[in-house]
Image (cartoon, rainbow, N blue to C red):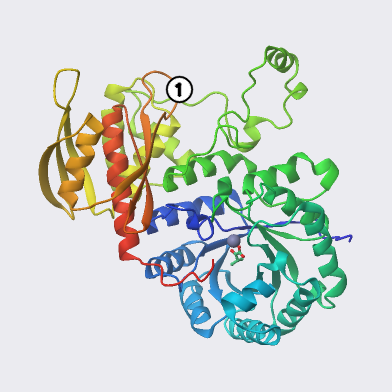
Amino acid sequence: MENDNKRVIIFDTTLRDGEQSPGASMNTAEKLRLAVQLEKLGVDVIEAGFPAASDGDFDAVSQIAAKLKRAQIAGLARATRSDIDRAWEAIKHAAHPRIHTFIATSDIHLEYKLRMNREEVVQAAVAAVKHARSYTDNVEFSAEDGSRSDWDFLCRVFEAAIDAGATTVNLPDTVGYAVPDEFGNMVRHIYQNTPNIDRAILSVHCHDDLGLATANTLTAIQAGARQAEVTINGIGERAGNTSMEEVVMALHTRHNHLGLETGINTEHIHASSRLVSMITGIMVQPNKAIVGANAFAHEAGIHQDGMLKNPMTYEIMRPETIGLSQTQLVLGKHSGRHALRNRLKELGYELSEEELDLIFAKFKTLADKKKHIVDEDLEVMVTEGILRTSDIFKLDYLHVTSGTTVLPMASVELSINGRPARNAGYGNGPIDAAFNSIAKLTGTQSELLRFTVSALSGGTDSQGEVTVRLRENGLVALGKGADPDIITASARAYVNGLNRLEYLKANPVKDRQGL
Ligand code: KIV
Ligand code: ZN
């Protein structure tokens, strides 16, 4: 179908579906920081969370709603009065609030999960949308597992939801089952068989179980959908969601073919990707489209030769378009507070005087150990020094002895809720010794599922960046830490992982019912 509307709405769900990536919990300060970045990036709608799922979610959504002024702030709610009331309570102070309510429509979900018949689902959808409309005129309705639903039933549900007041209807490929031509045909079927579809925006929300989320989303857009639900770096439940940067850059780069626009400021894509990876601890694979470390690296001689003659020989996008500058601005020992403040501002961090004092002190300490301070170093300072200030455990001191002839030993000092605690312990290596001492001090019994080390930036003096994945009583959390010394970076990552586990313990998810 021809859709004259050339503007594609970008609905970002990094803070909701993205946070459902195993281990990717974020604290409220981190969520707020990310929300500010998403607004700067230019996303139209920020799905800030699922307020009924946990008190932590509710809190974060309320704070984001109160802070942001330009983007629409969506709160997710199942099709029940209590979820919708809770979502509204969280977003009611937003400049542009949106309630996003959903119910499953596939026969398999109806029979085994909801134990409802089709008529009951239509009634529940209508009641939910009407209740949401009693609060706001910006209501989105999603047909969960839409891609596996009967096409005509789906049209019936959408028609009823639009009649009840839904202004956006969303078709999710919840389990990542769709393939592009089928999904495109489904969108066309909806347009042709939902009589009032012209009164709503048709949206799509894809998961990447078969690696087809971006392809499905683009095909749906070509078939007339005008909202894409996406996450930064494609993080999300299982194999993740459609990646924001892939959809946006495909629309941007292939404007000649697709002829569609978004409101995204593409030069903020790289910084947004870094921030999500830093906050969640989920690393971006090097060969990831658009934001992977190798996305603009040309290895083959013949490619390099062509690039030197004219970058367009092998490059379809300029790195600057996504905010990757070739020449990194470098700060050093002699840079002052003013230069630091300016660079932080350019990176999107507006700090108070007190916060700047703290970061400046950290900056001076690092500059004594490392000649060039790059953006990645600054990001770590802010993440560790400011966004994680609500943490229960803090690493204050670490001393390790290790080598071929001594038993590896670690002395650790932590503050636990502000009170100092000390311990020393052995291990089969310095990291094991440090982790054992920290576990003893914190009284935690997590299992280390994964441990990875990489360099934060180039150069042998780069800070080491460590990611750990921890599990305790069925809860999984990622932790990240950086330091020029990789044992210290490991201890920081471990402590960060333990803090995230504490956050999960304190904010149990009440019920995500199949989400
Ligand atoms: O994947 C899904 O179906 C969802 C809905 C709540 C939109 O995340
Ligand atoms: Zn989803």
Determine the residue positioned at 19% across, 34% down: 427
Between 381 and 81, the one nearer to me in the picture: 81
Q: Give coordinates of residue 91: x percent, y percent.
A: 50, 72
How many labels, in total?
1
Can you say whether 182 is above or below 151 in the image?
above
- Residue kind at label 1, given as amino acid type: Gly
Quarter of image, ligand 2 = bottom right
* Mark 1 surroundings: few (<14), some (14-19) or many (≥20) residues within 10 A: few
Between 472 and 400, the one nearer to me in the picture: 472
Q: Quadrant of residue 357?
A: top left
Q: Quadrant of the C terminus?
A: bottom right
Q: Give coordinates of residue 158: x percent, y percent.
A: 74, 76
Can you say whether 61 is above or below 402 in the image?
below
Left or right of 86 in this view: 263: right
Determine the residue positioned at 64% across, 51% down: 242
Residue corresponding to mark 1: 458
